């Protein structure tokens, strides 16, 4: 268990969050894939109207949901992004976040307050 100086359990709000590219759901799939491939964490967050929509990662690209031969410039990322599957909240303990990430083999965990995206954490951050 990781605790603050005062002995309280450490929360996600207590650690620096990492930034990854953020796009609108209407952004082309081709643009999002290019951003993802250039991003060290291989993650692009989708935010629409200021609200967290989901993430796009290599597992989404490789899932087989994108029609073979489709023009990725003409497809919007929204329907192909991972929705609210797993997210952390600022008041989640770092231990709970670490367990969630390990249980579901997540490379990053988006941190969301209500539906407002705040950043991501990795296991190394925790």
Image: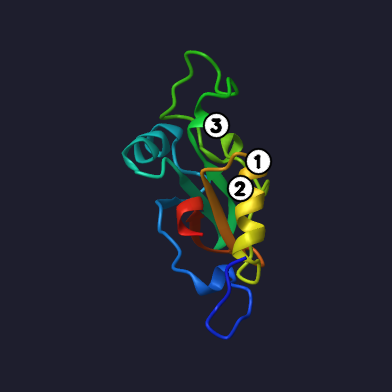
Residue at image location 61% in from the left, 47% down from the top: 101
68 relative to 115, above or below: above
Residue at image location 35% in from the left, 43% down from the top: 39
Q: Position of residue 78 (x, y in %)?
A: 57, 41
Query: What is the C-alpha distance between the residues marked 3 and 1?
Result: 15 Å
Which one is nearer the viewer's eye here, 7 or 125? 7
The quadrant in which the N terminus is found is bottom right
Residues marked 3 and 1 touching at CB (< 8 Å): no
Label 3 or label 2, whichever lies nearer to me, is: 2
Q: Is residue 121 left or right of residue 79?
A: left
Name the image colouring.
rainbow
Residue underneath mark 2: 101
**Label annotation for residue 60:** 3
Q: Position of residue 94 (x, y in %)?
A: 59, 63
Residues marked 2 and 1 touching at CB (< 8 Å): yes
Residue underneath mark 1: 104
Which one is nearer the viewer's eye here, 69 or 111? 111
**Label annotation for residue 1:** none
Q: Secondary structure at mark 1?
A: loop
61 relative to 78, above or below: above
- The quarter holding residue 79 reads top right
Q: Secondary structure at mark 3?
A: helix
Query: What is the C-alpha distance between the residues marked 2 and 1?
Result: 5 Å
125 relative to 27, above or below: below
Q: Is residue 21 left or right of residue 105?
A: left
Residue at image location 61% in from the left, 81% down from the top: 7
Query: What is the C-alpha distance between the residues marked 3 and 2?
Result: 17 Å
Q: Position of residue 106 (x, y in %)?
A: 57, 42
Which one is nearer the viewer's eye here, 53 or 58? 58
């Amino acid at each position: 268990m990781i605790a603050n100086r005062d002995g309280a359990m450490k929360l996600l709000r207590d650690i620096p969050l990492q930034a990854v590219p953020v796009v609108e759901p209407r952004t082309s799939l081709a643009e999002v894939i290019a951003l993802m491939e250039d991003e060290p964490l291989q993650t692009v967050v989708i935010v629409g109207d200021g609200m967290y929509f989901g993430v796009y990662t290599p597992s989404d690209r490789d899932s087989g949901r994108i029609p073979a031969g489709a023009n990725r410039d003409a497809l919007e990322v929204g329907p192909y992004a991972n929705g609210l599957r797993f997210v952390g909240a600022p008041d989640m303990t770092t231990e709970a976040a670490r367990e969630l990430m390990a249980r579901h083999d997540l490379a990053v965990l988006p941190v969301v307050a209500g539906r407002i995206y705040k950043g991501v954490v990795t296991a190394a951050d925790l």
